[in-house]
Image (cartoon, rainbow, N blue to C red):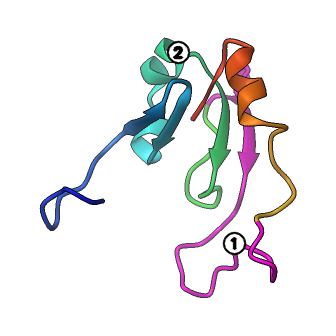
Amino acid sequence: MAGLPAGCEILGAVKIKDGLFVGDELAAQDLEFVVANKVTRVINCAGRQVPNHWESIGVAYLTYYWIDADSQVILDQRARPSKTRFTSNSACTTSAGTIK
């Protein structure tokens, strides 16, 4: 991440803008964070290692079972992401939910 000293990591979630966060495994397990930020949808890119913890309380998940390897294909041949996704980010934030 730009601006951080070498070897420095951010743990937890980082707010990108209102209603949009990027987080790690620690953030995915933090019920207090999920509830306080009204998280309703999560895109889990590490489904093999990180379970969908909060489905039982109504959090919707889009889960990818990607591996941390150079051989992992994330985009199709046209450099477009998978067509499986939530309808739109704006629809999520306007319904009083947030995306994590």
Q: Amino acid at mark 2?
A: Val
Q: Is residue 12 above or below residue 54?
A: below
Q: Is residue 95 above or below residue 71?
A: above
Crowding at label 2, few (<14), some or many (≥20) Cα neighbours within 10 Å? few
Mark 1, residue position = 74
Q: CA distance from mark 2 to mark 1?
A: 30 Å
Tell which of 89 and 51 is nearer to you.
89
Q: Amino acid at mark 1?
A: Ile
Q: Is residue 6 above or below residue 76?
A: above
Give the residue at x 78% y 25%: 91
Query: Picture coordinates of residue 61 (x, y %)?
Result: 73, 39
Query: Picture coordinates of residue 99 (x, y %)?
Result: 62, 31
Give the residue at x 65% y 37%: 42
Q: Secondary structure at mark 2?
A: helix
Q: Main secondary structure of the magenta part?
A: loop
Visible in this render: residue 57? no
Give the residue at x 45% y 47%: 25
Is 78 on the left-hand or right-hand side of 21?
Answer: right
Query: Picture coordinates of residue 17 (x, y %)?
Result: 48, 31
Mark 2, residue position = 35
Please report the bounds of the magenta region as a residue range. 54-80
